Image (tube, rainbow, N blue to C red):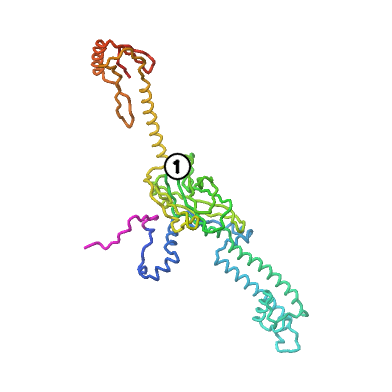
Amino acid sequence: MPSTKEVPEVGTIYLYDEEHVPRKSRWSKIPLFNFFRRKLKLDERELEEKRRAIMKKNGKYRVRYTGLNGYRRKYLHDLYITMVDLKWRYAFALFFNLYLITFFIFGVFWWFIAYNHGDFDHVNDPTWDLCVSSVTSFPRCLLFSIETQTTIGYGVAYPNTDCEGTLFMVFLQITVGILLDNILLGFIFVKFAQPKRRQKTIIFSKNACVNHHNGELSLQIRVGDIRKSHLLAAQVHGVLVRRHVTEEGVNYPIYLNNMKFTADDMDDTIVLMWPMVLTHKITEDSPFWDIKPADLTNEKYELIVFIEGTIETTGEFCQVRTSYTPKELLWGHRFDRIEEFDSGNARWEVDFAAFNDVVYTSNIRHSAKELAAFKDRKVLEDDEYDNDLKAFAHIQTRSLKTVSYDVGPELPVRNLTESRGKYFPVSKTDAESESDDTLTDNKLRKTDSVMSFQTADGEEEEGNSRFQV
């Protein structure tokens, strides 16, 4: 009977551990449930929460501060920025509660003025002049406070200037109301118009690729801007968060290493008119110099990329950032091309649907340090082999006085054998040399030919065809 166990799709690459892969629930068979789950991106949120990284993919730091009991007052010294940094639920709660508190406080003041004047003892007395007309209870005092601060003015309640304190109270409440409006409305406006909101429209690739670029091992990241107004004078740089131990034995678990990225031939300056591939060359100065794919299981590090620039529409400075864990690095891949020229409309088109597509290029199993050692060793072996060939080619025939047509001069014989990946010149054995000498002497007697050879040291030997290494 065939197995009912589900077989995973061929070619699927999971970027997280097996326990981090989303589990299918019993509700997943309901189409409506899957629709809302997909629209709300619940699977991505679950993976992000289980992703062990210092920074989230959206650029928010996952760092918690403790032991700040003695520093709480410093937040009050920078109260406006403290308000701006509040979460939206706390910001709206602060906005509504501050208005409610001021309305209530000034309502109490109006009630106290009316009570002190004796208005509540002459509620139905037509001859009594109230401090505030038609205000004979606390709810009416609260309503009059709201009308005064917001300058609504329904036309029924109005203050009596003959009553002591009404004129000053009107001035005080309107002044406080204008000041509070400016603070709270400006605070909410800044919350909406924060420069960091600009990072929502700048997207990074989900993975970083490691491949050979111009003969060097390089790390590449794709970045794109979906807006038509781009960042001005944008620059990119990165850091690698990795454990570091100094020569003195001091251990730094989160040590920052500088990483230089370039965009095409623009150095660290990027122009986001279309998606660009940021390249980091893994050289001896790179923190990736000794990192290889096998380190995914025992090495813990995180790559953080920053893009900084000026927003074109507002002129404010903006920073966009993201991070990559070792499981999000694809070794031996490069990003697929997404820009095509539309000859019909005479323009370039960019397909953001394939923004994260990669293609396989080669199997990389070694670090840049190991690959450089292999390359240097091969170059050294090739140089030694070339030197041996040059030394052998230097042996030339200096002069040939008499040449026989049936017997020619016997040139020195050198055997080339392969040993440990290198080629070494090997001379003949003594027995073979003696037999060759005897044969050569007999032939030279018959032909009366005299040979002269020049060795590598510049010495000449006549009538002898032996050459010893």
Q: Secondary structure at mark 1?
A: loop
Residue at the left extreme, as displayed: 1
Where's residue 226, x and y in %? 51, 58
Q: Position of residue 174 (x, y in %)?
A: 70, 72
Q: Quadrant of the C terminus?
A: top left
Quadrant where the N terminus is found in the figure = bottom left
Q: Which residues are magenta?
A: 1-18
In this view of the protein, can residue 63 be seen by the observer?
Answer: no
Relative to 405, is 161 on the left or the right?
Answer: right
- Residue indicated by mark 1: 214
Vertical arrangement, residue 320 with respect to residue 35, above or below: above
Q: How many circles with numbers are drawn on the protein?
A: 1
Q: Residues within 10 Å of mark 1 (few under 14, many from 20)?
A: few
Q: Is residue 460 above or below residue 144?
A: above
In the image, residue 383 lies at what x, y percent? 39, 29
Residue at 24% across, 18% down? 432
User: Quick check: can you spot residue 386?
Assistant: yes
Residue nearer the viewer, 155 or 79: 155
Q: At x 47% / y 57%, what residue is drawn?
A: 344
Per the picture, the main secondary structure of the magenta-coloured stretch is: loop
Can residue 6 be found in the magenta stretch?
yes
Q: Position of residue 17 (x, y in %)?
A: 38, 55
Residue type, numbered disc 1? Asn
- Within the magenta stretch, is there residue 7? yes
Q: Is residue 397 above or below residue 315?
A: above
Q: Residue 391: which quarter of the image?
A: top left
* Left or right: 169 in relation to 211: right
- Front-lying residue, 97 or 165: 97
- Is residue 144 positioned above or below 44 on the image? below
